[in-house]
Amino acid sequence: QKEVEQNSGPLSVPEGAIASLNCTYSDRGSQSFFWYRQYSGKSPELIMFIYSNGDKEDGRFTAQLNKASQYVSLLIRDSQPSDSATYLCAVNESGTYKYIFGTGTRLKVLA
Amino acid sequence: DGGITQSPKYLFRKEGQNVTLSCEQNLNHDAMYWYRQDPGQGLRLIYYSQIVNDFQKGDIAEGYSVSREKKESFPLTVTSAQKNPTAFYLCASSQGADYGYTFGSGTRLTVV
């Protein structure tokens, strides 16, 4: 069974700090990796995707990928209370159109 | 604006009833998906479809059925065989494996 694992949290950080969210996956053939943000009672929204090893930056968000270690992370700089949400890691199941989701990490940014 | 529309937003089902959740997209995406989310849990795949008139079971298909007669539409029926249907149901679509999903706003189903 292919899996994606995340620490459920909650991860609490003070406003203005860097939040670091981590995800490991078991499918060595996976090629595309995504981070979704889900506010309570709402549907997930895509915030970052990454395909290649290394870092990818978009505004306050940085996604990091290490395929050798099967590890994906999301850094949120200058965290704001509005960033408080559950962050879902999703990994493409190799050879399919399907994505495997982690159970999510709940982030709380304290004002 | 392009997007995915799910309806209804809230749905109440009596014991023994079948109910159908609607999902319509105008993004011209080939692939569509249904997920179930239970409180504090991740997304579990129910069914998915890559092209019209074709669909595959996901991890928890028992008690559910789908159809894909049009590219834009992928309705989900929750049958009476699904013994624990209370959950948040999410429909998604995708251009392909590298593009991620666009999600609808979800349907919250409750058994009464």
Image: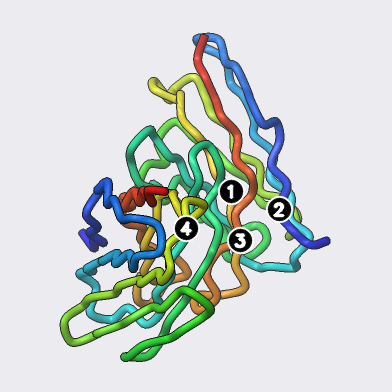
Check if mark 2's residue and mark 1's residue have beta carbons within 8 Å.
Answer: yes
In 3D space, how far apart are the residues under numbered discs 4 and 3 (Cα atoms)?
25 Å
> Please, which chain is the residue tagged with disc 2 on?
B
- The residue depicted at 52 percent of the width and 25 percent of the height is B79
Check if mark 3's residue and mark 2's residue have beta carbons within 8 Å.
Answer: yes
In 3D space, how far apart are the residues under numbered discs 4 and 1 (Cα atoms)?
29 Å
Q: From this viewpoint, which residue is outermost toward the left?
A: A69
Three-letter amino acid code of the residue under disc 4: Gln
Quarter-wise, where is residue A54 in the image? Answer: bottom left
Q: Which residue is mark 1?
A: B91
- The residue depicted at 46 percent of the width and 84 percent of the height is A57
Counting residues from the N terminus, which is met first, the one under dot 2 or under dot 1?
A: 2
In 3D space, how far apart are the residues under numbered discs 2 and 1 (Cα atoms)?
8 Å
Quadrant the N terminus of chain B occupies: bottom right
Check if mark 4's residue and mark 1's residue have beta carbons within 8 Å.
Answer: no
Q: Which residue is mark 4?
A: A80
- Within-10-Å neighbours for mark 1: few <14, some 14–19, many 20+: many
Q: Secondary structure at mark 2?
A: strand
Counting from the top left corner in percent of width and height, residue B60 is at 37, 42
> Please, which chain is the residue tagged with disc 3 on?
B
Q: Which residue is mark 3?
A: B102
Q: Is residue A65 above or below residue A45?
A: below
Q: Which residue is mark 2?
A: B4
For residue A7, which numbered disc appears in the image? none
Q: Secondary structure at mark 4?
A: loop
